[in-house]
Amino acid sequence: MDVSGINHINIVVSAGQFPDVVTFYEQIIGLTQGVRAVSKRNGAWLYCHDTAIIHLSVVEQPPYRGSNGHFNHVALSCSGVAAWVQHLNSHQIRYDVDYRPAPAMTQLFLYDPVGIRIELNFAGEQLDLSAPGA
């Protein structure tokens, strides 16, 4: 028995927040909406290539007993840290940078429109913080 990776994460948003959250994950993170099974709730599946990784659910109250609506972060494996920095800067998205020496990894931390922390991990990449726009 083993775990092979993350299947998906679920983000619960209100109907009013839904358009901004979809736009953020499409235009800023680069995911695309894809096939979604029929559901009692409105929502969307956001795909990375052919894999559904984020399930957005529209609800006006927490959908599950004990749910407090808090969510810490979503971590995504990425590449091309310098291009990402330019992209985020061009959209005026605030982010923090961290570098982990072992194993070598640059991390960018930002927030989506409903306050969920996004962690972008760049294994083996180091950002030149002296470069313009960094």
Image (cartoon, grey):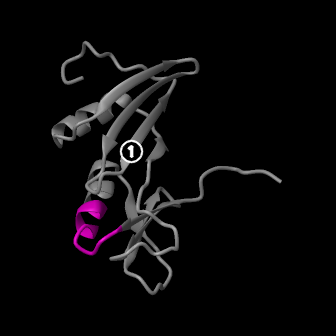
User: Quick one: quadrant of the N terminus?
Assistant: bottom right
**Residue 45: where, in percent of width, then height?**
44, 68
Q: For the residue carrying disc 1, how many other residues have a C-alpha within 10 Å: few (<14), some (14-19), or many (20+)?
A: some
- Is 119 one of the magenta-colored residues? no
Residue at 48% x, 56% y is 49
**Residue 27: where, in percent of width, then height?**
27, 53
Residue 85 as seen in the image, left or right of residue 12: left
Q: Is residue 84 above or below residue 33?
A: above
Residue type at mark 1 is Ile
Residue at 70% x, 50% y is 4
Of the pair 113 and 126, the residue shown nearer to us:
113
Q: Is residue 9 above or below residue 75?
A: below
Residue 67 as seen in the image, left or right of residue 86: right
User: Quick one: quadrant of the C terminus?
Assistant: top left
**Residue 118: where, in percent of width, then height?**
38, 44
Of the pair 10 and 129, the residue shown nearer to us:
10
Residue at 17% x, 43% y is 91
Report which quarter residue 103 is drawn in.
top right
Specify the farthest residue to the right.
1
Residue at 44% x, 48% y is 72
Total marks placed: 1
**Residue 28: where, in percent of width, then height?**
28, 49
Of the pair 23 and 49, the residue shown nearer to us:
23
**Residue assigned mark 1:** 118
Secondary structure of the residue carrying tag 1 is: strand
Q: Is residue 43 above or below residue 33?
A: below
Q: Is residue 108 above or below residue 117?
A: above
Residue extent of the magenta highlight: 13-22
